[in-house]
Structures are given as C-alpha cells and as structure tokens.
Image (tube, helix red, strand yellow):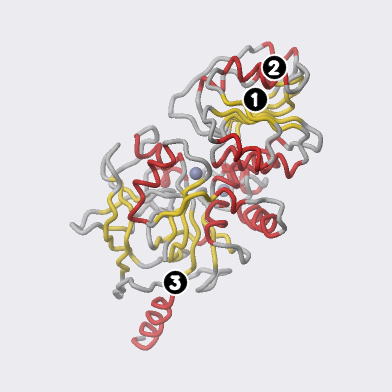
Amino acid sequence: MATSNTSLEVRIRQFSHGVALHSDAVQIYAAVLRAVNAPLSVESLTLARPREGEVLVEMKASGVCHSDWHCVTGDSVIDLPAVLGHEGSGVVAELGPGVTGLAIGDHVALSWIPACGACRECERGSPNLCQTHLPNLWAGLMPDGTRRMVDASGKPVFHLAAISTWATHSIVPAFSCVKMPDVPFEISALIGCGVTTGVGAVLKKAKVAAGDTVAIFGGGGVGLSTVMGAVLAGASRIVVIDRNPDKDAMCRSFGATDVVITDDLTDAVSAIREATDGRGVDHVFDAVGLASIESVLLDCLAPAGTAVLVGIPSNGTAFEVDAAEFIRREKVLTGSIFGSADTARDFVDYAQRYLDGRLPIDRLVTERYRLDEINEACDAMLSGGVGRGVIVFD
Ligand SMILES: [Zn+2]
Ligand SMILES: [Zn+2]
C-alpha cells in the first residue's frame, strides 16, 4: 500500500509541479470571493483528494465570463467564501475510485452543467437541461452535497458549478470532464462556456439555415461566438449591435456584415430592419441579458422569426412584449442555456471545427493573465474590452 501511494504521488507530481501533496489533501492556490463586491483574493487552500466518481484536474486555462461577475456583484446569489470560475480546461492529475473513460494526463474541458445521464432531459438528448444536480450546485456544493476546499483558518469554501476553475487545481465530477482533441488549453477553456453558448444558440437552438438573416445584440465573447456560429451556418446577413465603437473592427473580422454602434434601441431596431429591406431578420439573439434589449427583440424579426435569449439576466428580470406578434406573425421567443449543448459531443465537435479552420476561437483571446491578476482581468472585461481574457496557469 505504501508503495502504491508513493508511486501515485510521483505520478501526481508530474502533473502538479510546485504543489505540496499530503496523503489526503492537496495545497492549491485559488481566487476566493469572500464578500459581495469585494476584490478576489488569491489564497492557499487545502483541497481534498478525489472521491468515488471524481477527478483531480490541474487547471491550465480559464476564461473570465460575465456569469462569474454576476456572483461578485450578488446578481447571482451564492454562498461565500467561494472559488469562482466556470470556463476551464486542464489535465487529469488523479482519478478517484470507479472512474472509467479517463486517464491521468488526459486533456479535459469542464462542463458547468453536470448531467446525470439518466433523467428525462438527458435521455431525450438535452443534458444541458438536466436538473438532477442543480440544487446542490446552486448551493455551492459538489453533486454529493459536500465541500472539498478549506481555507487557512479551517473554514470550508464553496464551489462554483462543481468545477471552480479559478484555481490551480479542482476536484470535479468525472461526468463534468470532456476529453478533448489536441487543441491549445485556452481554446478548450473557451469552448467550456462562451463559445459553446454562442455557437450552440445558432446551430442547435435557432437552427439557422444557409441564407438566413441574423442580428446579435452584444459583441463580447458570447456575441462574437454567436457571429462565428452564424458564419458557420451560412447566414447571408449578420448584424451586430454594440455600444462600444472599439468592437466594430473585431465584429467585422469574425464575419459580421453590418455593425451598428448605438445604445439607442429604437435606432438599433431601425438599423436591423433597414439592413433587411424592412422585413426584419429571421433570427435575433440577445447576448447581453438586459430586459431593455429583450423587450425589443420581437420588433427586429421577420414573420415566423425566432428570438433567442442567450445572455443571462439578473434574477427577477421581467419584460413586456406585444402578445399579438406571436399569433399574427407567428414569431417565436425562446432561450438557450449553455448553447443547448450535449457537451460530451459538442465540445469535441467545436474543437474539431477549430482545427479545421472553421471556428477561429483563437482570435477571441485578446488578453492573458496570471491567476494573481484576476482582479485586473475582471476590470478589463467590465470596461468593455474586446474579445476574451484568459487566465493561464503554468
Ligand atoms: Zn460563462
Ligand atoms: Zn439528467
């Protein structure tokens, strides 16, 4: 037994350089949120070793997403202290008992909706709608209802979506791991949220067809991913609306045919209709998540058009629409969570399309940060900078 433990530690050290290991725990560094609207603090935490069906992942890259920021501001209410981050990729460093289909050293992207594989939603091919583990996840717990991180004072720390990617290492359920093709880690990290959310909303929810017209509110990471999806689908017209003039060139470089810089939504709707000879677009996406935008989506649509809510609004957000539009012009209003993805299949599919040169995900990455620069990374995202900032671990 002593021999196997020793060899295990040697193997882990190969993937966990610089991290002290104990028999039952790992010392890690993580960005901890201790209070709403407080700066994140990078701290040393003690992380328990993986249990049945779990994996220890050494993080390699993690994106910075607005959904993390909603936790910082309290728009998404979570228990604190917590380690945030939900857009990550890394290397399997240790397997818990009973894990199959993964091996030490595997490159994995992490899914923030762990699917049970057995419920009605999973069986019908919509694991993004699996509700089985959500109560524990929303409570900041692992699917088994426990926590695995402890701070220097011995206080337990909450998880985010059972993956907490703003950390050098994380304990994750094996079913949250998707083994990836040989792409850069920052590519697989972005596939773990923003890319899948945008591309999937186009391909899997709206099912945009070649020649369709598309409008997208928001030219950030998810908005640009929505543009990429529309290009992939063969959309004939792709109109992006954003308030930041710096986004113009970036949106066009991804394939937007029209970029409308305005914060006046009446002007935005007029511009969308003008771009489509007054008819309106076949599909409109809100990649921002504001009620003011959501309330004008139907006005942007052609008859039988589809509006898709993608950006997650603050809890309790409500908006009004003209109900007659659903009947007289058969418009559709729907939403898409996590790109309506079957992550086990779609993460790999999007990585393959990146390798084929059809999804230029690398061009989304405009800034790279170390973990101890996490607050700067959040500030840059909030200032409306172009593209996506990525935390890299090495
Ligand atoms: Zn996200
Ligand atoms: Zn399920």
Amino acid type for the residue under numbered disc 1: Leu
Residue named by callout 1: 333
Q: CA distance from mark 1 to mark 2?
A: 8 Å
Please rate how many residues cluster around mark 1, counting C-alpha atoms within 10 Å: few if below 14, some from 14 to 19, many from 20. Answer: some
Q: CA distance from mark 1 to mark 3?
A: 44 Å
In which quadrant of the rendered view does residue 30 lie?
A: bottom left
Amino acid type for the residue under numbered disc 3: Glu
Nearer the N terminus, badge 1 or badge 2? 2
User: Looking at the picture, does residue 376 appear above or below residue 329?
Assistant: below
Image x and y of residue 93, in percent: 45, 71
Q: For the residues labelled 1 and 2, say whether their Cβ atoms are less than 8 Å apart.
A: yes
Nearer the N terminus, badge 1 or badge 3? 3
User: Looking at the picture, does residue 303 appear above or below residue 240?
Assistant: above
Image x and y of residue 63, in percent: 47, 50
Left or right: 105 as drawn, with respect to 324 = left
Nearer the N terminus, badge 2 or badge 3? 3
Q: Residue at x 65, y 19 (%)?
A: 298
Image x and y of residue 226, in percent: 63, 39
Q: CA distance from mark 2 to mark 3?
A: 52 Å
Image x and y of residue 101, in percent: 58, 69
Disc sitting over residue 326 in the figure: 2
Count numbered badges in the picture: 3
Residue named by callout 3: 94
User: Looking at the picture, does residue 303 appear above or below residue 42?
Assistant: above
Does the closest atom of ligand 2 sit within 8 Å of the Cβ of label 3?
no
